[in-house]
């Protein structure tokens, strides 16, 4: 089960911090997938901490990508940022709702495995890849 998320590694990024952040995100995501898999009936004790760690990492990562996009005047910046904002908000609300007892583990599973993960993979392969390629070309143009 823990290898499920490992099957599709995020694509190689031309920007070092993006590559490193995505690899770290992968490790954190694997933990959440494991915690969710272990949470049959009772919630795995590490689940909320794992979710919080991932949210923190993701917030910092999105900020780094957004700074880069501003620096290089990446034209689709608003679209890329909007995707970040929407998905991060969704994760934060989900954790808040879990803390408040308003949603259960099945809802978290559905949001995370059913919606967030597929989006995340697509996002890395499209938006992030385009951003990294643009940044690389921008950098080469300055050399
Ligand atoms: Fe990214
Ligand atoms: Fe991104």
Image (cartoon, helix red, strand yellow):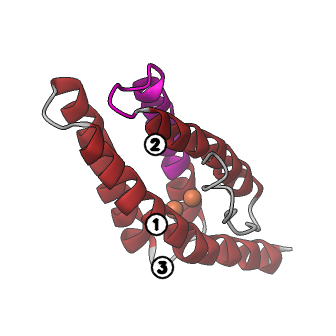
Q: Which residues are magenta?
A: 40-63
Q: Which residue is under mark 1?
A: 118
Label 2 crowding class (10 Å Cα cut-off): few <14, some 14-19, many 20+? some
**In terms of image quarters, where does ligand 1 lie?**
bottom right
Instruction: Please give the label number shown on residue 37.
Output: none
Label 1 crowding class (10 Å Cα cut-off): few <14, some 14-19, many 20+? few
Which callout, 2 or 3, points to the residue nearer the camera? 2
Left or right of residue 33, residue 93 in this image:
left
Give the alpha-carbon distance from disc 2 to disc 3, as whole Å: 22 Å
Q: Which residue is under mark 3?
A: 75
| First along the sequence among labels 1 and 3 | 3
Left or right of residue 10, residue 70 in this image:
left
| First along the sequence among labels 2 and 3 | 2
Q: Which residue is under mark 2?
A: 59
Decide which of 3, 117 is in the foreground and name it.
3
Q: Secondary structure at mark 1?
A: helix
Which callout, 2 or 1, points to the residue nearer the camera? 1
Q: Position of residue 34 (x, y in %)?
A: 55, 39
Q: Secondary structure at mark 2?
A: helix
Whether the residue carrying mark 2 lies under 8 Å from ligand 1 is answered with no
Residue positioned most to the right = 143
Which callout, 1 or 3, points to the residue nearer the camera? 1
């Amino acid at each position: 089960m823990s290898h499920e998320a490992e099957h599709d590694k995020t694509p190689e990024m031309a920007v070092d911090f993006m590559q490193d952040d995505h690899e770290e995100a992968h490790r954190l995501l694997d933990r959440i997938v494991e915690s969710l898999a272990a949470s049959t009936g009772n919630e795995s004790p590490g689940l909320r901490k794992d979710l919080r760690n991932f949210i923190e990492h993701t917030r910092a990562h999105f900020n780094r990508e957004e700074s880069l996009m501003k620096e290089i005047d990446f034209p689709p910046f608003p679209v890329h940022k909007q995707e970040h904002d929407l998905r991060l908000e969704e994760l934060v609300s989900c954790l808040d709702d879990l803390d408040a007892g308003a949603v259960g583990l099945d809802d978290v599973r559905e949001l995370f495995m059913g919606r967030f993960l597929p989006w995340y993979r697509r996002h890395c392969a499209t938006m992030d890849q385009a951003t990294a390629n643009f940044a690389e070309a921008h950098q080469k143009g300055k050399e």
